[in-house]
Image: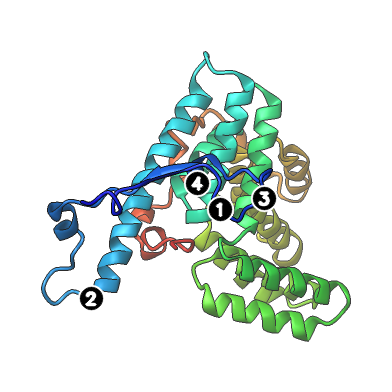
Amino acid sequence: LTSSQRQVVTGPRSGLRPNLRLPRRAQSFEFVMPTAKQVMDHLPDVGQDSDQKGFEDLCTRWNREEAEAVDKAKRTLQSPNTTKEQKVRGIEELEYWAIRRGGYDAEIVLIGTLKAEDKELAGQAHISLKKTWASHFNAWVNSGISNAKVMQERGRTDEAMKVYNKVIFENPLWGEGYHLRAKLHNQLGDVNRTLEDLRKTLEYCPNNYVVMVELGLTLMDKWKDYKGAHDLFQNAGDLCPVLPIDALLEILYSKAPHLKVEAEASKSENVFSMEAPPQRLLPEGWVDKFEATERPNQA
């Protein structure tokens, strides 16, 4: 390489105001020509589309970065030697990956943090989970949803429904789209479609304990399906101890006393921990399903 090809750029560039400082990374960097082997490793195979090859390499890099970041955040939260500030940053890191990539690993660690002895950390994890489930990685989708919510509040339900239908059509694996449409169906008094969309939400977001409670209340009040409501309330309570599950169960037991007897008999089973969630919270074969491997926020 000639000196002109390999130059180090330092300090502010000409033409900039004297008091304008560039970011540290822009103040000093060095261009290094990749080796022939590095170039060949990134070339597509014979017959393979170069765009597809680039996308696969990018996903591989992101998967590695995500795995390393989630593992580091998990160790930070579990270690007795880290400060509270470090643990809060770990929760924020998990929230970032859960929203950006739809990361189930990050989500599971956040759910485990709900059981933390420090209630402030548990509350922060609860807030992060709600933001994770309600947010899409695409800012345009979030903007459209915000507009649809305003339409819904102002009674323009037909326009809001069109937005939700469009979001679901374009993002069929994103559970929150079905959740939003379920709320609108409930507002319109359509119980059947409300139940259908709430179940769809849990199909694509099986740990969303907020939706579990909503579906349980709907089953209890509208369909008199007390057993189904009981299972949902129990699962939600296992995941998030800050929910008022005991109050909901008391209402349910007043309508179906036999369920209370069954619940007390199995109370000692399925103890939750970050390392081993209750088996009934892990749908059989979920990790092999298309919805789990093709993540909705894969971008």
Q: Nearer the viewer, residue 299 or 211?
A: 299
- Identified at 46% across, 49% down, the residue is 104
Say which amino acid is labelled 1: Ser
Q: Which mark is residue 26?
A: 4
Circle 2 packing at 10 Å, graded few (<14), some (14-19), many (20+), is few
Instruction: Return the residue at label 1.
Output: 14
Mark 2 and mark 1: Cα distance apart in space: 42 Å
Which quadrant, please, contains the C terminus? Answer: bottom left
- Identified at 82% across, 72% down, the residue is 150
Say which amino acid is labelled 3: Arg
Say which amino acid is labelled 2: Asp
Dot 4: what SS? helix
Which of pointers 3 and 4 indicates the residue nearer the eye? 3
Mark 3 and mark 4: Cα distance apart in space: 16 Å
Which of the marked residues, 3 or 4, is nearer the chain's N terminus?
3
Circle 4 packing at 10 Å, graded few (<14), some (14-19), many (20+), is few
Q: Quadrant of residue 110?
A: top right
Residue 133 at x, y = what percent? 61, 55
Which of the marked residues, 2 or 1, is nearer the chain's N terminus?
1
Residue 114 at x, y = what percent? 61, 33
Instruction: Return the residue at label 3.
Output: 17
Mark 2 and mark 4: Cα distance apart in space: 34 Å
Which of the marked residues, 2 or 4, is nearer the chain's N terminus?
4
